[in-house]
Structure formats: structure tokens, C-alpha cells
Amino acid sequence: MGQFHAPWGAILIPKHQRMFGILMKDNMIIFLRKVALTLIFLPTVALSQGALENPASSTTESGIGIISGWHCTAREVEALVDNVSVGYTYVGSDRSDTKSVCGGVSATGFALLTNFNVFTPGLHNLKVLADGKQFGEVNFTTVKSGGVEYLQNVSQQTIVENFPSTGSTATLTWNQSKQSFVVTSIAITGATALKFEWPANGALIAGYDEVSNKGLDIGGQAGDPVYASADGKVVFAGSGLIGYGNLIIIKHDNTYLTAYAHNQRLLVAEGQTIVKGQQIAEMGASESERVKLHFEIRRNGISVDPISFLPNR
């Protein structure tokens, strides 16, 4: 039998080596398929490696606030409003909620303090860059919370009924350093043990108006009885408060006061403890154009609508 000679330039590979090469090729194909599937199903947020959270898209901003979010790998974040830089901030505050998408890293948070009042009222665009590369963008609207860039030397409080839930009342107080109103107390109607009663039997002649009438006006005849609306202690009984005539103020707890104005005669003195329904005065017209009782309920020093606390009649 003659000897077999391979054609010029051909290389003969033993059979077991050829099989190994085929196996390696198949394994590589399987590996690449797994990588492709992983990339397809990997959450978008992980691919972006970060998120801009505040301000949210299409919100209205005012006062002193923050531009904030997180980024897995950035050292520094820059914010641009309408393509103009408004500042830089380092990344590194603790955000344990990002560990699952940042390979176990939690020092991913960032925040940039911003006075939104400096921007012209209207629509604006915000972009955030991580070490020079954009990773977030939103549009938002601004208004000047105090009418100017930085309002000073003013104070004001207001009441918001049924917030944060039905039956609750929030007190909002102007905060200069934040250039906005902040919630300073929450009162829950019905949580107090106080049960107010009508302080007089006459007809209601004027209702509560936050601007011009801080309480209720109840009509009647001179000398008609005026009753304590709830248990408490008399903290003022006299005159001297302009526009109220002969006045009684009763403190019911650390939150509520009631006031009874324009009386003809006072029947209680300061420091006296009284009970609900006790006669405390006679109706009159002191510093008033007619005989009436002006009745107020004050919560944390701020007048509220007594109708919300009194029983129907």
C-alpha cells in the first residue's frame, strides 16, 4: 500500500483535537447567547447607572429645594437648567435602596441645593451629567413663592382643612430659609376629648370669614345668657382688646381657646375654672353696632371656623 501524502499546505488535525474545537465553539455560542439574554432583560435603570428623582417631570417648583437622585459610579454630578450650569455636587450619600442595581454599592446619592425662585416663572429644562455624561433630563415649571427671589421680614400662618387626610387640619407657617410654607402642626378633629357646644341660643347673623370675621356672630337681646362652649379655665376677662368690647377668653387645653366678645356683663374672673354650659356673661353691644355675641375658636392661636366644631342645630 502506498504512503498517503497530504496536499501542499494542508495541515492534518487529529480527530480528538477536531472534536475539542467543535465543543469549544458550541460553548462559546451558548455563552454569547446568555450574555445577549442578560442584556435584553437587565433593568433599564441598571444600564443607565443612575436616576434623577427631584424635581420630577412636569412638576411645579418654588422656593429653596433640591436637585437630587443617585448614580452608581459617578464622582461628581453637574446640573444644567436651560443648558446653563447651576452647580456641581459630589456623589456619596447613603442610598441603601440602590445596592441591588449598583453591585452592592450604597454611597450613590447626590443633592444640590437650589433656589427655584431665581428662574423666570414658566417652563424650564433640567439635565444632569455624571462626570460629564448626561444621564437624566426633565422639564419642570417654576413660580416665585414669595413674588421675588428671596422674600424677607414677613411672617404668616394659614390653615388647610382636611389635610393630610379627611378630619385633619394642617397649620402652615412661612419659613424664610426655605422660601416656602412648611407644615408646623397637624390637628386631628375628633381626636380631642373636647366637645364644643353653642355659646348662645340666638340666630346666627354672620358666619366665619378668614379675612373679615374670625368667628361667628350670634344675635339676641341685651342680657341674654352666654355659655361656656367647653370645660376650661378663664385666662382673660375684661376689656382693652380693641374691637372686642367686654371679652372672655377660655383655655380648654394646650391647643384650643374660645373667645366671647361684646358682652354687657361678665360673670367670671381670670383664673376661674368653668364647665361646659355654665353661664359666663350676658350678651351686649360693647364696641359693637348691635347686640350680639362674637364667638371664636382658636387652635394653636389661629382662628378656625367654629361651625366645623359645633353640633348641628
Image (tube, rainbow, N blue to C red):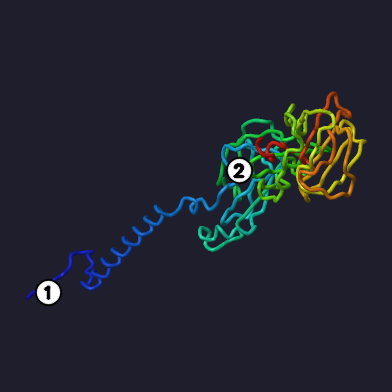
**Residue mark closest to the camera, 2 vs 1:** 2
Name the spot of residue 282 as percent of width and height, x first: 85, 35
User: Between residues 93 and 62, which one lies in front from this camera angle?
Assistant: 62
At 27% from the left and 70% from the top, the residue drawn is: 20
- Label 1 sits on a secondary structure element that is loop
The C terminus: image quadrant: top right
Q: Is residue 76 left or right of residue 174?
A: left
- Check the image and name the residue furthest to the left: 1
Name the spot of residue 271 as percent of width and height, x first: 88, 49
At 87% from the left and 46% from the top, the residue drawn is: 235
- Check the image and name the residue furthest to the bottom: 1
User: Between residues 124 and 272, which one lies in front from this camera angle?
Assistant: 272
At 51% from the left and 50% from the top, the residue drawn is: 48
- Check the image and name the residue furthest to the right: 240
User: Between residues 105 and 65, which one lies in front from this camera angle?
Assistant: 65
142 versus 113 height, above or below: above
291 versus 88 height, above or below: above
Are the residues tagged 2 and 1 within 8 Å (C-beta)?
no
How crowded pointer 1 is (Cα within 10 Å; few <14, some 14-19, many 20+) is rated as: few
Residue 166's label in the rendered image is 2
Q: Can residue 3 be seen in this view?
A: yes
Q: Is residue 147 visible?
A: no
Mark 2 belongs to which amino acid?
Thr
Mark 2 and mark 1 lie on one chain; the one further toward the N terminus is 1
Name the spot of residue 3 as percent of width and height, x first: 12, 74
At 86% from the left and 28% from the top, the residue drawn is: 285
Mark 1 belongs to which amino acid?
Gln
Q: Mark 1 points at which residue?
A: 3
Name the spot of residue 224 as percent of width and height, x first: 81, 33
Marks 2 and 1, how far apart at CA:
101 Å
Q: Is residue 307 left or right of residue 244?
A: left
- Label 2 sits on a secondary structure element that is loop
